[in-house]
Amino acid sequence: MKIARPLAALLCTLLLAAPALAEGSLTLLDDSLPECDFISGTSLLRLDGDEGYAVGSIDGTALTDAVYTNLSGYEGYIVAAQVNADPINAFGLLDAQGKTLIPFSYGDVDVLSSEWALGVVLTESTADNYDYQAFIGDGYYLISTVDVYHLPDGGKLGTFERANFMDADPINHCLNIEDRATGTVTTYDAGLNALGTVENTWDDDFAPADYETYRENGQYGIRDKEGNVVMEPAFYSVYDYKRGYFEVSTGEKSGLVNAQGHVVVPAEYDDVETSYYLPALPDWSTSGFEAAGYFAVELDGKLGFVDGGGNVTCAPTYSTDIMDCNGASATLTDLEGNLRIVAADGAETIVSGYDRVRPMEYGSGIFYTVTDADYKKGVIDWHGNEVLPCTYADVELSADGQYLLADIDYDHSALYQVTYPAPGAAPDVEADTTADAAAPEAAAEADTTADAAESGDAADAAAPEAAGADAGSDAAANPAATLLDNAASLIAADATKNRDAAVALLQSAEKLLGEDHPAAGLLQSAATLLNADAAMNAGSVGTLLESAKALL
């Protein structure tokens, strides 16, 4: 089943796209789709079939047959029920490519985290003795058995009878299971080996986190789980770790340190706000500190924004008591009753003419859904600019925030690619390069490319062959071209494995060129395609890089 134009059409559109502006924008990919929607919590499409639903990729390719009655996304996986299966035990689990991870033989599949899931076999019971009750009707069910799955390995690890299973909680990379008969809580590792017993299912005595704090001379530092120092002791306290950032405190003021141990937001604020409506990737949470390259901070009871270099981009003006922080923007109603959007870059806009204005889920506070008096929906950006008019039955973003579906009516939909405004500074200006900050593990695998990139000199990031090339060549004359060549080599070698390192090189090249360079928009589009599906889009990215090089 195909419901969208081939990726070649998408590529042609992107090649014509202008460099990113300060506003958010959409690029139309297809306006003649049969009505469809995103599977909740994913960037995959739910496609109608004769008997049920199919899972579709963003380009409209059906990844499965249309044999499912239920499709719901959790932690990057899809819980589904099959048509014509056992009416009680019909559920299983699909991965992001539509492949079956857990067979369709359970009454419930409980995805606990991106690592752990439970397959629960149910039997019919009565209203006076049950574990599950049907949403509709008078169905009552008891747990028969519970199978434990470790999803990264894709296999069943073991089975617990009902008498030995009461509850389970994922703790870091381990699983705590409570025994129904004894009340004992046991911690298991990724092989379902018992590590020890704890008092509660949320205890982490035997489940080390990826990072830990340690104290020296009255100050706290950060180590990884192997004991390597990420940040030397420098702060009075270290708090939450969210999506790559630690909140730190001097005892009086707060700031942020990234996962490489570099200060991103100086500890000069009363608080660093948690931003919501973020893309679900990379950790399947929609809350964190960074939104589209900006950070919301509180000072003297007022909300403001800084960029990834710690530079103030929007001075704290309004009380946090009257502002709703939506990511890279905030909203408030002023004394005259006007709705104002305060953008992280300092722009402030009065929004009028709509019955309802709401931040879009997964939109980072850059995009808002607006509804008119006729209940038609459209989209505006963080500066109040109309991105889509109010002519649609519904609008929604994919979980990665990169695509938008707009229902033209209840029979047809339009698919758009989303472009976000470039932030004022790179998220990690203290790191030597963007590649080092973005993915140290991937960069370490990138041979000479990553080793050179760590030197902090973009021109030195050239591969040995490029470094020894004739001084008059394009690569030697233009460091950005060299970065693009290295990115192309990584993608050709293994697009999935080298995705993060390649994206980091593209970001470094974009920074060298500046956001106004005609190639910058192409590099952003290439990075978007890599992040969406590196393997599937590798060929298209290669074409984009060649087009970008032609503009250098």
Image: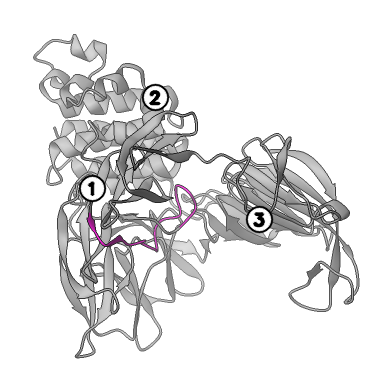
Q: Which residue is labeled 1 in the image?
A: 16
Q: Amino acid at mark 2?
A: Ala
In the depicted view, which residue is nearer to us: 263 or 51?
263
**Circle nearer the N terminus (2, 3):** 3
Give the quarter of the image for residue 144.
bottom right
Q: Residue 353: x, y in percent?
A: 25, 85
**Circle nearer the N terminus (1, 2):** 1
Q: Which residue is labeled 2 in the image?
A: 492
Q: Secondary structure at mark 3?
A: strand
Q: Residue 520: x, y in percent?
A: 19, 42
Distance CA(mark 1)–CA(mark 2): 24 Å
**Magenta stretch: helix, strand or loop mostly:** loop
Which contiguous range is marked in magenta? 268-285
Q: Amino acid at mark 1?
A: Leu
Q: Residue 264: x, y in percent?
A: 25, 46
Q: Is residue 46 magenta?
A: no
In the depicted view, which residue is nearer to us: 265 or 452?
265
In the depicted view, which residue is nearer to us: 337 or 503?
337
Q: Residue at x 47, y 55 (%)?
A: 285
> Is residue 315 in sight in this rendering?
yes
Q: Residue at x 70, y 34 (%)?
A: 191
With respect to residue 291, does 535 lie above or below?
above
